[in-house]
């Protein structure tokens, strides 16, 4: 005869009971692990409108790429760029910490310590203005200028 017909019902039910307990224990253990991992995750709420903004100022001669770590809208046209703000073109780089950028007029102004670097010039100033779509850069406050002179001998 068939072996399964001779299985004792009590033994079979006890076996099913232990299998069910095992699976319930597995589910509870997994749920506890998920809850502990979820509690370890820190939710960062920030007051930043834009994370890592990237855009450019375009004029007829050149393109100036602007990057920052974060930005906040001050109004419809103005954005406050903060932390690691860089203005980069083929000719120069300006680095600073805070800049107010006007999207409509494509102008920028900073009142924080700024570093201008180009091929033969380095300027450290207390701020700057970029006007006329990047064609005019004015440095403010105490400024330290280093000019590199090149001698050409024939």
Image (cartoon, rainbow, N blue to C red):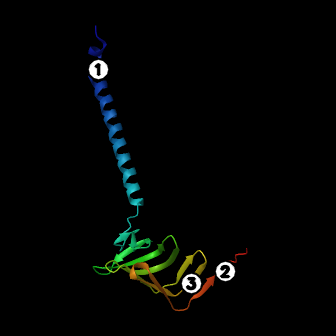
Q: Are marks 1 and 2 in contact (CB under 8 Å)?
A: no
Q: Is residue 136 above or below residue 69?
A: below
Residue 138 picture location, percent across and down:
48, 87
Give the Cα separation between the discs numbered 2 and 3. 18 Å
- Asked if one can make out residue 67 in the rendered structure from this viewpoint, the answer is no
Front-most of residues 61 and 143:
61
* Residue where numbered disc 2 is placed: 149
Residue at x-position 54% and y-position 79%: 116
**Disc 1, SS:** loop
Extreme residue in the front direction? 154
Front-most of residues 70 and 141:
141
Query: Quadrant where the C terminus lies?
Result: bottom right
* Residue where numbered disc 3 is placed: 124
* Residue where numbered disc 1 is placed: 8
Query: Quadrant where the N terminus lies?
Result: top left
Give the Cα separation between the discs numbered 1 and 2. 101 Å
Residue 43 picture location, percent across and down:
37, 65
Residue 111 picture location, percent across and down:
46, 87
Question: On the picture, is 96 further left or further right than 57?
Answer: right
Residue 28: mark: none
Extreme residue in the top direction? 1
Residue at x-position 52% and y-position 74%: 93
**Disc 2, SS:** loop
């Amino acid at each position: 005869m068939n072996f399964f017909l001779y299985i004792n019902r009590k033994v079979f039910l006890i076996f099913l009971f232990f299998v069910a307990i095992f699976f319930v224990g597995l589910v509870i253990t997994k749920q506890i692990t998920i809850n502990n991992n979820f509690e370890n995750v820190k939710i960062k709420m920030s007051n930043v409108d834009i994370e890592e903004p990237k855009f450019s100022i375009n004029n007829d001669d050149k393109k100036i790429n602007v990057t920052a770590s974060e930005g906040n809208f001050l109004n419809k046209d103005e954005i406050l760029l903060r932390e690691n703000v860089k203005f980069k073109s083929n000719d120069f780089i300006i680095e600073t910490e805070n800049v107010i950028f006007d999207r409509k007029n494509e102008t920028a102004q900073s009142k924080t310590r700024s570093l201008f670097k180009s091929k033969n010039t380095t300027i450290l100033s207390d701020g700057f203005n970029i006007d006329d779509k990047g064609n005019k850069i004015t440095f403010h406050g105490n400024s330290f200028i280093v000019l590199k002179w090149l001698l050409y001998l024939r």
